[in-house]
Image: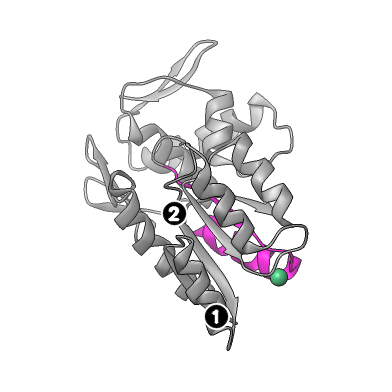
Amino acid sequence: MALGIPYILIAEDERGQAEVLKYNLEEDGFRVGVAPDGRQALDMIAEALPDLLILDWMLPEMSGINIMKNLRAGTDTKLLPVIMLTARGEEDDRVRGFEVGVDDYVVKPYLPSELIARVHAVLRRARPELAEEKLEYGGIMLDLTRMRVSRDGDAIELASTEFRLLRALLSRPGRVFSRNRLIDLAWSTTTFLEDRTVDVAIKRLRQALNEGGKADMIRTVRSEGYSIE
Ligand code: CA
């Protein structure tokens, strides 16, 4: 698991639905992967274990039920929290889903906000260490639930990348994060990003945090990366 930033995998073959959900989860501060079929979902899970899986029950290549059996038989994946997506009226699917160990279900069509509320509830139950909803350090307060930041009580407006950068830094004050690590934590993309992209975002974050002449709390560690101190 990435420091304090839960990674969610969506296994969903309906591309439009997967994209909308991905967008909304990212706006909520999660890192998100999408698998378009059952086999790729298992491959992606083997590569990087998510904190939670959103599993469409009707997937090409491998059904939801077989994916669940596979996951529950694996050492690393035995306890992976799973929310299943089922079609309206498929009561049998839900029963079978619970029999093979899904944690919760959501019926399609759903509102992204409804599903995200379930994600939070399942994560709180399954991974209480992820439920930390506020990060505070040196007068900076980051509210993960409301996506708000303040410093010494003054509200600060941040774009989502800067928000995630600050969240990463605040998860371990004093620890130096390399640019690569920050890219992993704050940009949900597999596209190659240059170090310079991180530097530019850090500059924007600094400007926002230091507004009104406040002391700079972000430390640049030459050729290493950044920390908050
Ligand atoms: Ca489907």
Is residue 20 shown left or right of residue 120? Answer: right
- State the residue in front, 88 or 213: 88
Q: Position of residue 51 (x, y in %)?
A: 46, 46
Q: Residues within 10 Å of mark 2 (few under 14, many from 20)?
A: many
User: Range of the magenta residues?
Assistant: 5-28
Asked whether residue 111 is in view, the answer is: no
Mark 1 CB within 8 Å of ligand 1: no
User: Does the CB distance between marks 2 and 1 fall below 8 Å?
Assistant: no
Name the image quarter holding residue 215: top left
Q: Amino acid at mark 1?
A: Asp
- State the residue in front, 58 or 7: 58
Residue at the image position 48 percent from the left and 71 percent from the top: 105
Q: Which mark is residue 81?
A: 2
Residue at the image position 53 percent from the left and 27 percent from the top: 181
Q: Amino acid at mark 2?
A: Pro
Question: Residue beneath label 1, please?
Answer: 92
Q: Residue furthest right?
A: 61
Residue 13 among magenta residues: yes
Q: How is the image coloured?
A: one colour
- State the residue in front, 45 or 7: 45
Is residue 70 shown left or right of residue 138? Answer: right
Asked whether residue 14 is in view, the answer is: yes
Which quadrant of the picture is home to ligand 1? bottom right
Residue at the image position 35 percent from the left and 63 percent from the top: 121
Location of the C terminus by quadrant is top left
Q: Position of residue 176 (x, y in %)?
A: 41, 19
Against 26, is 130 above or below? above
Residue 152 among magenta residues: no
Is residue 141 shown left or right of residue 16? Answer: left
- State the residue in front, 206 or 46: 46
Q: Earlier in the sequence, mark 2 or mark 1?
A: 2
